[in-house]
């Protein structure tokens, strides 16, 4: 980016600078013998244009809204519209979650993000033996369309966009959402939102899988196909690095494994005959915003550039919308401390700022009490206000990609892209991401990183304020925590039984048979059959039960 | 008397998929010289207790981040009693509100280690508790 003459001068200057530094170091050493990013990348003392030699502004950065999208996916970014402020929420019953959503919308939140309880995420109704003790705990319990109607009561589905963290049974919950829309008079082509629908990272890091990989990939590509024609504004998948990072991965691994998952989905869809220029427009991503501020900003930019290149080079994608990596971000839950929890407000603010400077499309900020329990209304309020302060007060949203051109940021962007691509190539050599997961490679890489981090914290090499440094005695501190009513499970089971006694049992039986037939015939798309089944109030557990019988269940590959 | 190695079952009961903590603790216990059996996800209280008895374990370490801790600890301890295996130590960790800890201890849980606990603390506690038990 600099002419030869200028670069020569810079190199000379660097030499002199280093000489001076070496002298000074003899008198006064630096804080550590070597400096690294939170993700373990070596950091230079000083970055200069020398580090960007051979770097091309036009090719490597370009302009916002243009290939390779390093500087963002929209031409005006947040000058046009802020990112969507979307707090992940849901607990207890549909009615209580509905009240929390209305509260958040009143407070200026601009999109919904539904958290389901674990039985819902794993395709069990609330009365299943495996659901005992878990109903309504980490999210809202949804057994049938009846619950979904309550969940979105009074919330116009043509006005809000809704993100649903649902994976293995994504097609069932999407079908319920479509059915609620229809009841409100909103046709499915007007619905906008996202389903997570990312099974590969469930095998790797999050754990809410149901079916083995092959039928799981079919369910996913069926959704791609169905939504391309019928629900064109829906993001059919949110390819998630978030949980991979939470499980302990480094920033580079987060980018590498997420994009490798993405490539596996694209390959599966292409081999089914779908056009990546079409379904590629509805792929979205989900990343973590961790502590290391500059590394994180660089990470988002590197991911965007690398994905665009991969889509172009590997699949010949030409549609700009199918080349751009659009992503949601959540601040890093694993960085929250149970000790001096108020400090988490500051951590979240820094992480959220990195996400905004990295060009996120939507953002969830964690609540400060999440290492202790589900967040209270008050702590969720502070988390949302944090985003609003960044948006309206900090000024960082007023010019596009303001940190571009920083020698450090651009150097790290290059480095992360390079190392992530090395991982992706290695995974290719193993035969692709499915194989790399089956043989435990990906899990092992992440666990090693997690264990190394734990050791670094225990040796004091990694400082966690309030945990291994600057600690105080907090015994007996009173905290206000959210408690889910222990009766929620009981009440939900009662409501489920009542609903079952009211519905047309024969219609349910017939609809489930159609789902079974569709499951057996790979040339059919499963979505229409599932939509019909939810409309007659077949439960999630019944539909997933049929699919379990037809597809079998995934057995975890335990890696330690 | 030549001491046999401490044997621990590290367990993930229920549907919770957060296994980072369980795996880090399992590895730390192993590196501290213990024999560790990690169950993997989605275990029932029955399967956990069964494994612990079959493996002749000294202790069961339970990791729960889903809020279902009261239910699972209660079931595991109840089953251990029913099978006359109450000598197996039960301890745990995860996202467990402080207010819930006294109730769990009363139930018979030996110790609850919250987020941020050094693995060393857990190792030392377990070594002591097992030594006590073997006396």
Image: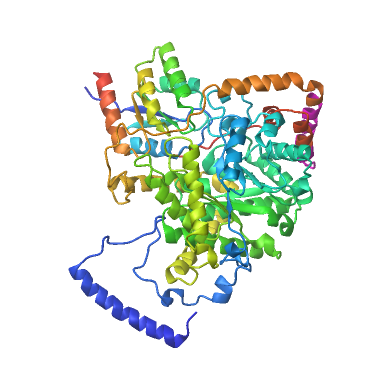
Locate residue A336, reporting x and y percent: 41, 44
Q: Residue at x 27, y 29 (%)?
A: B127
Type of colouring = rainbow
Label the magenta part by its dominant secondary structure.
helix
Q: Could you tell whether A306 is left or right of A415 in the image?
A: right
Q: Is residue A314 above or below residue A548?
A: below
Q: Position of residue A525 (x, y in %)?
A: 78, 42
Q: Residue furthest front?
A: A106
Rendering coords of residue A200 (x, y %): 59, 45
**Which quarter of the image is occupied by the C terminus of chain A?**
top left
Above/below status of A55 relative to A183: below
Does A318 appear above or below A111?
below
Q: Which residue is at the front of the view, A430 or B73?
A: B73
- Asked where in the image residue A481 lies, by quadrant, the reply is top left
Q: Quadrant of residue A42?
A: bottom left
Closer to the camera, A392 or A462? A392
Q: How many marks?
A: 0
Q: Is residue A284 above or below residue A518?
A: below
Most distant residue in the bottom direction: A5
- Specify start and end residues of the magenta stretch as a single range: A509-528
**Residue A341, horizontal then vertical, whole percent:** 38, 42
In the rendered image, residue A172 lying in the magenta stretch gets the answer no
Residue closest to the eye, A499 or A68: A499
Is residue A510 in the magenta section? yes
Residue ID at (39%, 22%): B104
Residue A127 visible at all: no
Comparing A25 with A75, the one in front is A75
Q: Is residue A110 visible?
A: yes
Query: In this view, which residue lies farthest toward the left?
Result: A27
């Amino acid at each position: 980016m600099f002419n030869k003459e200028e670069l020569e001068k810079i190199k000379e200057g660097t030499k002199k600078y280093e000489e001076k530094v070496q002298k000074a170091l003899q008198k006064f050493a630096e804080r550590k013998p070597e400096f690294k990013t939170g993700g373990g990348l070596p950091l230079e003392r000083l970055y200069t244009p020398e580090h960007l030699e051979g770097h091309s502004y036009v090719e490597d950065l370009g302009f916002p809204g243009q290939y390779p999208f390093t500087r963002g996916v929209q031409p005006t970014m947040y000058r046009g519209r802020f990112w969507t402020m979307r707090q992940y929420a849901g607990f207890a019953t549909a009615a209580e979650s509905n009240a929390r959503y209305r509260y958040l919308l009143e407070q200026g939140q601009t999109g919904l993000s539904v958290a389901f309880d674990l039985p819902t995420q794993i395709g069990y109704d609330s009365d299943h033996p495996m659901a005992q003790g878990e109903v309504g705990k980490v999210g809202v319990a949804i057994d049938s369309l009846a619950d979904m109607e309550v969940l979105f009561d009074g919330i116009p589905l043509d006005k809000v966009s809704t993100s649903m963290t649902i994976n293995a049974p994504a097609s069932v919950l999407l079908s319920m959402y479509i059915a609620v829309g229809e009841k409100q008079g909103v046709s499915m082509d007007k619905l906008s939102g996202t389903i997570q629908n990312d099974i590969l990272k469930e095998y790797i890091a999050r754990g809410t899988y149901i079916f083995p990989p092959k039928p799981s990939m079919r369910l996913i590509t069926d959704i791609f196909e169905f939504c391309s024609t019928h629900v064109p504004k829906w993001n059919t998948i949110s390819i998630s690095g978030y949980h991979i990072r939470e499980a302990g991965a480094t920033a580079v691994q987060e980018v590498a494994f997420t994009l490798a998952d993405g490539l596996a989905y694209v390959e599966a869809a292409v081999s089914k005959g779908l056009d990546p220029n079409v379904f590629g427009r509805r792929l979205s991503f989900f990343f973590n915003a961790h502590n290391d501020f500059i590394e994180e900003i660089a990470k988002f930019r590197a991911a965007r550039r690398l994905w665009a290149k991969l889509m172009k080079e590997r699949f010949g994608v030409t549609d700009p919308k199918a080349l751009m990596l659009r992503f949601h971000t959540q601040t890093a839950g694993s960085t929250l401390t149970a000790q001096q929890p108020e400090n988490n407000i500051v951590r979240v603010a820094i992480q959220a700022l990195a996400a905004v400077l990295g060009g996120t499309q939507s953002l969830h900020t964690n609540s400060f009490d999440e290492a202790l329990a589900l967040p209270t209304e008050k702590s969720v309020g502070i988390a949302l206000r944090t985003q609003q302060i960044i948006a309206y007060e900090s000024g960082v949203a007023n010019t596009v990609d303001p940190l571009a051109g920083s020698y450090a940021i651009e150097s790290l962007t290059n480095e992360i892209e390079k190392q992530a691509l090395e991982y992706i190539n290695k995974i290719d050599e193993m035969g692709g991401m499915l194989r790399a997961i089956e043989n435990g490679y990906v899990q092992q890489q992440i666990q090693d990183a997690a264990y190394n981090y734990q050791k670094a914290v225990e040796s004091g090499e990694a400082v966690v304020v309030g945990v291994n440094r600057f600690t105080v005695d907090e015994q007996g501190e009173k905290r206000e925590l959210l408690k889910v009513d222990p009766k929620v499970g009981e009440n939900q089971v009662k409501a489920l039984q009542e609903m079952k006694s009211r519905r047309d049992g024969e219609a349910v039986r017939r609809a489930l048979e159609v789902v079974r037939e569709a499951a057996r015939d790979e040339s059919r798309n499963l979505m229409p059959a599932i939509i019909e089944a939810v409309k007659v109030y077949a439960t999630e557990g019944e539909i997933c039960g049929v699919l379990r019988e037809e597809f079998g269940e995934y057995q975890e590959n335990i890696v330690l | 008397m030549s001491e046999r190695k401490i044997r621990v079952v590290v367990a993930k009961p229920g549907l919770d998929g957060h296994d980072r903590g369980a795996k880090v603790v399992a590895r730390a216990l192993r590196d501290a010289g213990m024999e560790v059996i990690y169950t993997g996800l989605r275990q029932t209280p029955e399967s956990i207790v069964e494994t612990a008895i079959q493996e002749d374990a000294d202790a069961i370490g339970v990791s729960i981040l889903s809020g279902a801790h009261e239910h699972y600890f209660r079931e595991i301890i109840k089953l251990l009693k029913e099978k006359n295996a109450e000598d197996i130590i039960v301890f745990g960790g995860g996202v467990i509100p402080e207010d819930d800890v006294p109730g769990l201890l009363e139930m018979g849980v030996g110790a609850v280690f919250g987020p941020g606990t050094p693995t060393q603390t857990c190792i030392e506690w377990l070594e002591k508790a097992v030594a006590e038990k073997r006396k």
